[in-house]
Image: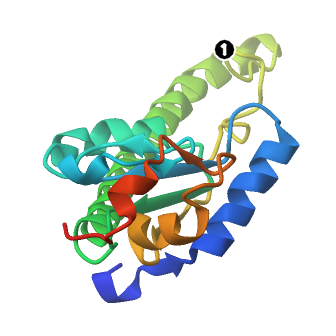
Amino acid sequence: MATIGTLERLSASALSRLILAEQAAALGDPTIAIIDVRDDDYIGGHIRGAQNVPSRTIDAMFPTLVRRLQDKETVVFHCALSQQRGPGAALRYIRERERFLASENKKAAAAKSSAAEDDGAADAVADSSASGVVGQDGAAGSEGQDKPVQQTVYVLDRGFVGWQEVYGTDERLTEGYRKELWEDGYWG
């Protein structure tokens, strides 16, 4: 089970490489999601493409986030410094995703069991008519069902404060940056 201490950290330079690679590939739906959990301190800029989900409202948003991000290979959480809100949100997201996947697995197993029972009755009819019924969609079982995407969850090391020190003025990577708000540092 994940803990705050076992959360993986991602440096600003590694995240910038991921973002730029996705921009260069331009394959449509990105495989990375960046979740910015800053509250009122969101002013002054944000990482390009990041979703702002304020920490004060994120608990109610976890079920939606898990479903919305289920096809993303990489999810990066951050706040201003990534010391409390960002890591806490990442940990709660991981746990919510584990609960969601366990629930989905139970539903799939129940559906498979129900389908097997239905197929058993159909097989009895098929045996007498030699027609070989394999299922409603013509497929032989549920092997073709989509498995959940293997997902890596990171916390941005040093948060947006560290990010803006290096990439604040890079418009490929940062949106809405206001340098004057950061000149004296971050005082949360």
Camera-nearest residue between 3 and 143? 3
Locate residue 156 relative to residue 123 in the image: left or right.
left
Q: Quadrant of residue 151?
A: bottom right
**Taking 34 as reference, is 160 above or below it?**
below
Secondary element at image label 1: loop
Q: How many marks?
A: 1
Judge by depth and name the residue closer to the eye, 162 or 113. Answer: 162
Q: Which residue has dot 1 on it?
A: 136
On screen, residue 8 above or below 61: below
Q: Residue 166: name its quadrant.
A: bottom right
Q: Residue furthest bottom?
A: 5
Instruction: Locate residue 45 relative to residue 133 in the image: left or right.
Output: left
**Residue at image point 35% right, 78% down:** 2
Quadrant of image for the C terminus: bottom left
Instruction: List x then y, in percent, for residue 129.
Output: 78, 10
Three-letter code for the amino acid on which mark 1 is drawn: Gln
Q: Is residue 155 left or right of residue 185?
A: right
- Badge 1: few (under 14), some or many (20 or more) residues near its Cα, within 10 Å? few
Q: Quadrant of residue 184?
A: bottom left
Tell me if I can see residue 148 in this picture.
Answer: no
Residue at 38% in and 47% down: 106
What residue is rendered at 82% in x and 13% in y?
A: 131
184 or 139: which is nearer to us? 184
Q: Quadrant where the N terminus lies?
A: bottom left
Q: Answer left or right for 54 relative to 2.
A: left
- Give percent across and percent down for residue 104: 41, 43
Residue found at x 49% / y 45%: 50
Q: Nearer the viewer, residue 109 or 28?
A: 28
Q: Residue lying furthest right in this view? A: 25
